[in-house]
């Protein structure tokens, strides 16, 4: 991975989206900033999606990443509505990346967990502890949306550092 290359991780959600910007420095990846942006849960779906798109576009403009990492859509048969709503949020985020001409790398949840902890079935707490240790954070990254965004970005960094090209 080229030194100074920026990777932006996003954890899509209809209520809360986590984000993380990382840069590959001389000593490996370092966290530049991480946080969340939220939508008004009382607003209509199209208004919430527009808010997500606007926030994503603003962050992409602010951090100017070279690549965006997101988790692939996962659907559990018991909760198809959740997957559909997350798909809407993920879709407007991907569109924001396309509009900004930023390539996107999608990773399965299992792939992200394995890349971060070595275990594709790692718990949220294991991921948080590993992130805190690797990035020398003073505390565990919270909420989970932030930890998931950092994990996606770190997974992408790991692939790029291993020589796996951006497609």
Image (spheres, rainbow, N blue to C red):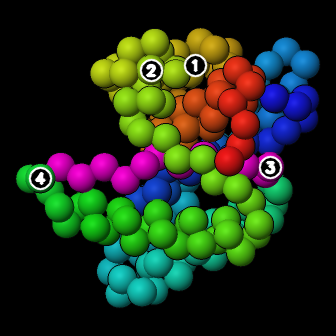
In which quadrant will I find the N terminus?
A: top right
Residue 146 percent coordinates (x, y): 52, 42
> Are discs 4 and 1 less than 8 Å apart at CB?
no
Cα separation, mark 4 vs mark 1, equals 33 Å
Task: Indicate which disc residue 77 carries.
Answer: 4
* Mark nearer the N terminus (4 vs 1): 4
| Mark 1 secondary-structure assignment | helix
Which span of residues is magenta-colored?
A: 65-76
Label 2 vs label 1, nearer the camera:
2
Q: Is residue 139 above or below residue 152?
A: above
- Asked which quadrant contains residue 160, the reply is top right
Residue 97 shows up from this direction: yes
Q: Residue at x 71, y 75 (%)?
A: 99
Task: Indicate which disc residue 132 carries.
Answer: 1
In the image: residue 83, left or right of residue 29: left
Question: Which residue matches tag 2?
Answer: 114
* Mark nearer the N terminus (2 vs 1): 2
Of 136 and 80, nearer the camera is: 80
Label 1 vs label 3, nearer the camera:
3
In the image: residue 28, left or right of residue 130: right
* Mark nearer the N terminus (4 vs 3): 3
Task: Indicate which disc residue 70 carries.
Answer: none
| Magenta stretch contains residue 70 | yes
Q: Residue at x 43, y 49 (%)?
A: 72
Question: Which residue matches tag 3?
Answer: 66
Q: Residue at x 46, y 57 (%)?
A: 12
């Amino acid at each position: 991975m080229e030194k100074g290359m920026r990777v932006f991780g996003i954890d899509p959600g209809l209520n809360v989206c986590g984000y993380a910007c990382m840069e590959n420095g001389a000593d490996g990846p370092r966290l530049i900033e991480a946080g969340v942006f939220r939508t008004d849960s009382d607003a209509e779906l199209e208004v919430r999606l527009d808010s997500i798109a606007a926030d994503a576009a603003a962050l992409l403009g602010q951090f100017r990443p070279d690549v965006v990492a997101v988790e692939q859509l996962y659907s559990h048969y018991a909760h198809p509505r959740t997957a559909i709503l997350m798909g809407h949020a993920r879709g407007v985020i991907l569109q924001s990346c396309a509009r900004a001409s930023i390539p996107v790398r999608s990773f399965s949840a299992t792939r992200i967990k394995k890349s971060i902890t070595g275990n594709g079935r790692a718990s949220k707490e294991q991921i948080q502890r590993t992130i805190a240790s690797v990035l020398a954070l003073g505390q565990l990254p919270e909420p989970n949306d932030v930890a998931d965004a950092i994990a996606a970005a770190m997974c992408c960094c790991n692939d790029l550092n291993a020589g796996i090209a951006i497609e």
